[in-house]
Image (cartoon, rainbow, N blue to C red):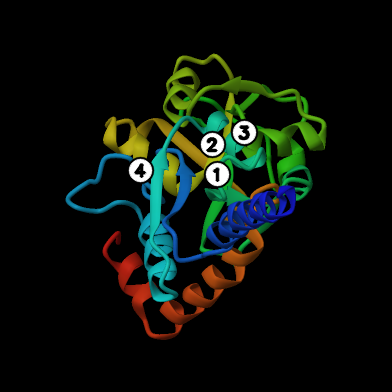
């Protein structure tokens, strides 16, 4: 009498774990991607119907391979932490560095940005040809960003600020002499606040941005090649260019 009951229990366990695995392995389920407001790459509140070119690129690339992508906006430190710990499969937009390679898998590049040093127009900066020339100077970058990690890596002693907006407001007040940041997003925010004429800019390098997949999430190794396939398709047929043209 006990044998059928044991078999039934084993059958139930197989159903439970079998269904669980099939759901986890089904890339057609909606995918939640975490992001921070970082215009014009991604915007939590659309401007004239525009969500940001990285936001639109990711949604469209996944759509091409039959995956629905839902982008949720949270503070950057939470986005990084939740994705690193496998609570979300992917993070947008994400620059590559050695520290992040331990926790993330990187898509093909989805966009690029020029990085460099902002300074007040009334400040005469020393000659700067590369980022290392800022060592010993008063410099800041945004907490949790790869730009801050880069400054620490080269031996600078950066001030941490909570956002680009706070950074260039403090820069204007003379709290530090340089703000290390990406040009497209920072210029966009400076323009919105009517502060365009207050800062100069020195280019130091160019960075690629990626969609970063958590090494701890069970869907990442399935979703990464699917996303890259969809991204290649929208680049090839001109959709990627059309998305970016709406922001020029």
Q: Residue lying farthest bottom?
A: 237
**Which numbered marker is on residue 79?**
2
Q: Residues within 10 Å of mark 2 (few under 14, many from 20)?
A: many
Residues under labels 2 and 4: Cα distance?
A: 22 Å
Viewer-side label of 4, 3: 3
- Element at badge 3? helix
Residue position for label 3: 81
The image shows residue 109 at horizontal and vertical percentages of 58, 65
Mark identifier at residue 132? none
Which structural element holds mark 1? loop
Q: Check disc 4 and report its element: helix, strand or loop.
A: helix
Discs 4, 1 touching: Cβ within 8 Å: no
- 20 vs 146, nearest the viewer: 20
**C-alpha distance separating marks 4 and 3:** 26 Å
**Residue depicted at 28% across the width and 36% down the height:** 192
Tag in front: 4 or 1: 1
In the rendered view, would you say 112 is above or below 101? Answer: below
């Amino acid at each position: 009498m006990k044998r059928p009951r044991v078999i039934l229990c084993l059958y139930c366990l197989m159903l439970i774990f079998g269904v669980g695995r099939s759901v986890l392995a089904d890339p057609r389920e909606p995918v939640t991607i975490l992001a921070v407001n970082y215009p014009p790459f991604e915007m939590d509140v659309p401007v004239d119907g525009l969500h940001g070119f990285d936001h639109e690129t990711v949604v469209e690339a996944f759509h091409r391979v039959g995956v629905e992508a839902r982008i949720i906006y949270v503070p950057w430190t939470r986005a990084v932490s939740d994705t690193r710990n496998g609570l979300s499969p992917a993070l947008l937009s994400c620059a590559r560095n050695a520290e992040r390679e331990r926790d993330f898998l990187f898509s093909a590049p989805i966009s690029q940005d020029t990085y460099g040093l902002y300074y007040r127009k009334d400040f005469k900066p020393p000659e700067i040809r590369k980022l290392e020339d800022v060592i010993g100077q008063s410099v800041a970058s945004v907490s949790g960003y790869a730009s801050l990690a880069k400054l620490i890596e080269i031996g600078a002693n950066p001030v941490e600020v909570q956002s680009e907006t706070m950074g260039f407001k403090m820069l204007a007040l003379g709290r530090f002499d340089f703000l290390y940041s990406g040009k497209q997003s920072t210029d966009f925010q400076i323009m919105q606040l009517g502060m365009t004429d207050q800062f100069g800019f020195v280019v130091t390098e160019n960075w690629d941005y990626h969609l970063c997949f958590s090494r701890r999430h069970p869907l990442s190794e399935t979703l990464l090649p699917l996303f890259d396939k969809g991204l290649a398709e929208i680049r090839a047929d001109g959709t990627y260019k059309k998305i970016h043209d709406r922001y020029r």
